[in-house]
Amino acid sequence: MLKKENILLVDDDIQILELLQRHLTSMHYHTYSAVSVKEALYILKDTAIDLLITDINMPDINGIQLIKYMAEHYPDIPKLVVTGFPSIDDAMSVIKSGATEYITKPFTKSELADAVQKSLECTQHRKSKEKVFPKAQQGYGEMIGTSEAFKEVVEIIERVKDNHATILVQGESGTGKELVARSIHYSGKFARAPFIAVNCGAIPENLLEAELFGYTKGAFTGAFETRNGFFQAANNGTIFLDEIGNASLAVQGKLLRVLQEKEVTKVGSQKSEKLNVRVIAATNSSLTELIEKKLFREDLYYRLTVVSISVPPLRERISDIPMLVSKFLQKYGVEYKDRLVGIAPDALEILERYPWPGNIRELENVIQRAVIMSDGQVTVKHLPEQVKFQIDFPEQALKPLKQVEKEYIEKVLVATGNNKTKAAEILQIDRKTLREKLK
Ligand SMILES: Nc1ncnc2c1ncn2[C@@H]1O[C@H](COP(=O)(O)OP(=O)(O)OP(=O)(O)O)[C@@H](O)[C@H]1O
Ligand SMILES: [Mg+2]
């Protein structure tokens, strides 16, 4: 029963951080910890924070500066100050800077609980949360990416999310096919209806039909009662048929009927039921090859590909790697180390060079492992051997100069937060040339 509130803790004193964290976790809040203002800003950038708790005296940038910054950039987040100096002057400057509440060290757990409660109550910031935290244009919902290949995928998602057209999502393993399907559902107007994911490869062939369409009592041994299938459960929403290439020819025939007639028939029943379900299917094997081998029905293939989305492999969207890495560093840093974990530039370069046969899932696993092994900074030694020693470049990995230039420009833009003036400066070209190149 985790409370929904995310609390960001900022203190250079690890012991206070741990104390705060222990107390707040026991009160069922979710906490993020930062040992400096800089780390705090990173977390704020892409996490929806409901309350800030900060110390005042910290090296480099102090808490007052943080509060002033937040008052300007995140005015709706309440700010609770924990200070060791309960002088009147101090209290005044704290309140003037825009803090919502303050407590003095040492504090008891109930003092903390009261202050947190009051801070959270005194703003009704939650209603505007979405507006205050646009995802910094780093992608689309949960999907990270700004590369051309990624944008093409997003364009199709935008076009199909609000209608019930059948969609086939194709792509290598780990490219994000399921995430694409979820994004279509959850960003569209049927988002409130169910999204049901079915892995056609994981359900034994003789059960798949009953699981998908339901069955009537007595339809087969063990069918003690009439039951709905995944299709009925997904009514008005989306059914995601993962690994569709694994469906038997018999199930394929039934699916074809569902798509043509918009109705399903339970196993053992004569009656059909009308349904209104969007079907999104996914596969990482080539369906056209299966068709040639007579393992997949051609007519079903055409029904499924009303809209077809190819999710690009990671090696074709290298410019997205730094962003993905930083997302996973943050995710696992917070999970395992309770802080932000960075990465050394040469380690990042290695990650950008590796061809990622297992795509984003492989990248995520590599970062997860590296974070566990690291001490706050991922370096080359935390990367697995197969990633490090990818020295031979297969010929198709060698690229034309134009493409390298394009990718590099994208990288600089990402690094400068899309600041074209700064990017032009780094690239030592004028803004006009940069603009032309961007076209
Ligand atoms: N654009 C993205 N941004 C952030 N994370 C992503 C993105 N695409 C995929 N992921 C993450 O990568 C992992 C793999 O994604 P997903 O399961 O959707 O891939 P898949 O193509 O269905 O893989 P498989 O073929 O192995 O089933 C997930 O943890 C997902 O959250
Ligand atoms: Mg999948």
Image (cartoon, rainbow, N blue to C red):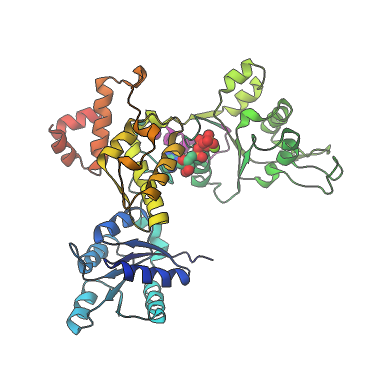
As drawn, 82 above or below 385: below
Q: Nearer the viewer, residue 426 or 346?
A: 346
Residue 299 sits in quarter: top right
Q: Which residues are magenta?
A: 150-167
Q: Is residue 212 magenta?
A: no
Q: Is residue 13 left or right of residue 210?
A: left
As drawn, 175 above or below 10: above
**Residue in view at x 32 percent, y 71 percent:** 16
Prevailing SS of the magenta stretch: helix
On the image, the x and y values in percent for residue 340 come to: 33, 54
Q: Is residue 1 left or right of residue 429?
A: right
**Residue in view at x 83 percent, y 38 percent:** 268
On the image, the x and y values in percent for residue 109 come to: 40, 79
Say which quadrant the C terminus sits in. Answer: top left
Say which quadrant the N terminus sits in. Answer: bottom right
Q: Nearer the viewer, residue 69 or 381?
A: 381
Q: Is residue 157 magenta?
A: yes
Farthest bottom residue in view: 88
Q: Is residue 183 left or right of residue 196?
A: left
As drawn, 332 above or below 171: below
In this orientation, does residue 274 appear?
A: no
Residue 111 sits in quarter: bottom left
Report ligand 2 position as a quadrant: top right
In this orientation, does residue 93 appear?
A: yes
Farthest top residue in view: 292
**Residue in view at x 85 percent, y 45 percent:** 217
As drawn, 315 above or below 238: above
Residue 256 sits in quarter: top right
Q: Is residue 346 left or right of residue 30?
A: left
Q: Nearer the viewer, residue 142 or 184?
A: 142
